[in-house]
Amino acid sequence: MNQTTLILGGTRSGKSRHAETLLQQNPAPWLYLATGRAWDAEMQTRIETHKSRRPKGWQTHETPIDLTTPLKTHPNTPALVDCLTLWLTNLLLEEHDIPAHTISLLETLTTRTAPTILVGSEVGLGIVPENALARRFRDEAGLLHQTIAQYAHHVFLCVAGYPLAVK
């Protein structure tokens, strides 16, 4: 993969801020692929907070399912995917073929010339969820992150606002 970085961390760990800082080391414009959906007012507020902290130069694309089209359309534009676990949630809830989407994403990443940073929430450090869907999500997230990390040039784990280099 060409200049691919995976950044993992828990909620409010600083992973998105670190990703934005890294990507802005490249000249603008920067592509922001937002996978979150505003299911309620609280999520809409989170989305607006993310948007408000980015300076001019960011081109935001709302991509809850299709990550590959904007990455292919803009192969020379530095890109940030935020976040893989929300993307996974969307795939699960709409019953998409997760392995097929993962393979498509990996294939697309190999064709890009500009840096790509992918952010994901590390959800496997807590207790075992009580319901089957939550357990499946936790397992799928772990597998997705392992797969991306295997091919990424760099992997970071953010803890309390500090990025730790894993790879």
Image: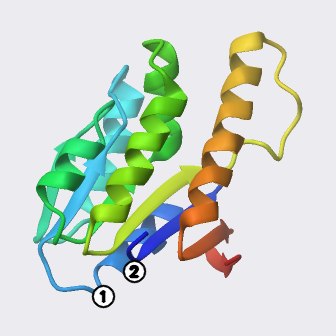
User: Is 131 placed above or below 114 here?
Assistant: above
Report the residue at 24% width, 66% height from top: 54
Instruction: Name the spot of residue 57 as percent of width and height, x first.
Output: 11, 71
Asked whether residue 131 is in view, the answer is: yes
Asked whether residue 11 is in view, the answer is: no
Q: Which residue is mark 2?
A: 22
What amino acid does circle 1 point to? Gln
User: Is 123 placed above or below 50 here?
Assistant: above
138, 162: nearer the viewer: 138
59, 45: nearer the viewer: 59
Where, by quadrant of the figure, is residue 124 drawn?
top right
Q: Which residue is mark 1?
A: 25
Q: Secondary structure at mark 2?
A: helix
- Mark 1, other Cα within 10 Å: few <14 / some 14–19 / many ≥20: few
Where, by quadrant of the figure, is residue 159 drawn?
bottom right
User: Contact (CB < 8 A) between labels 2 and 1?
Assistant: yes
